[in-house]
Image (cartoon, rainbow, N blue to C red):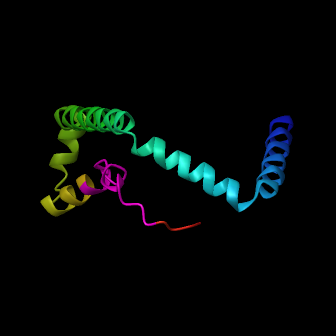
Amino acid sequence: MRGKLMFLTGLAAGFVLGTRAGREKYEEIRANAQKIWENPTVQEAAGVAQAQANKLYTEGKDKIQSSKLGEKLSTTGTTSSTTSTTDELLAPSDSLAGSKGTSTGTTY
């Protein structure tokens, strides 16, 4: 109960401070965050993290397929279309990597 009360208090304080700061402050914070995200060093680190995530995903997928569970799953009669659909659903997306410089100036 105490945790919920603290969360609600923090939420209320953030709301009040945010509304007092106004739209201009929001736009300033947003522009600064975008500058940081577009920094080449940050993009390089994001690329490294994405590559590591893809590697871990592939290794984990290979381990599961070579395990007893993977053997059971492959012998239960799954079709290749089901497998490809599952791979598409589980594969890491490149949505962040693809939106590096696609700022549309949309306000929220």
Query: Which stretch did the figure color magenta?
Result: 88-104
Look at the image and tell me in which quarter the C terminus lies.
bottom right
Let me know if residue 94 is in the magenta part. yes
* Main secondary structure of the magenta stretch: loop
Look at the image and tell me in which quarter the N terminus lies.
top right
Rendered position, 41 above or below 81: above
Q: Position of residue 27 (x, y in %)?
A: 62, 57
Q: Nearer the viewer, residue 91 or 36?
A: 36
Q: Residue at x 47, y 41 (%)?
A: 36
Q: Position of residue 8 (x, y in %)?
A: 82, 47
Count of numbered circles on the image: 0
Q: Residue at x 30, y 38 (%)?
A: 47
Q: Is residue 61 left or right of residue 107?
A: left
Q: Nearer the viewer, residue 69 or 40?
A: 40
Rendered position, 103 above or below 74: below
Q: Residue at x 85, y 44 (%)?
A: 9
Q: Position of residue 107 (x, y in %)?
A: 56, 67
Q: Nearer the viewer, residue 46 or 65?
A: 46
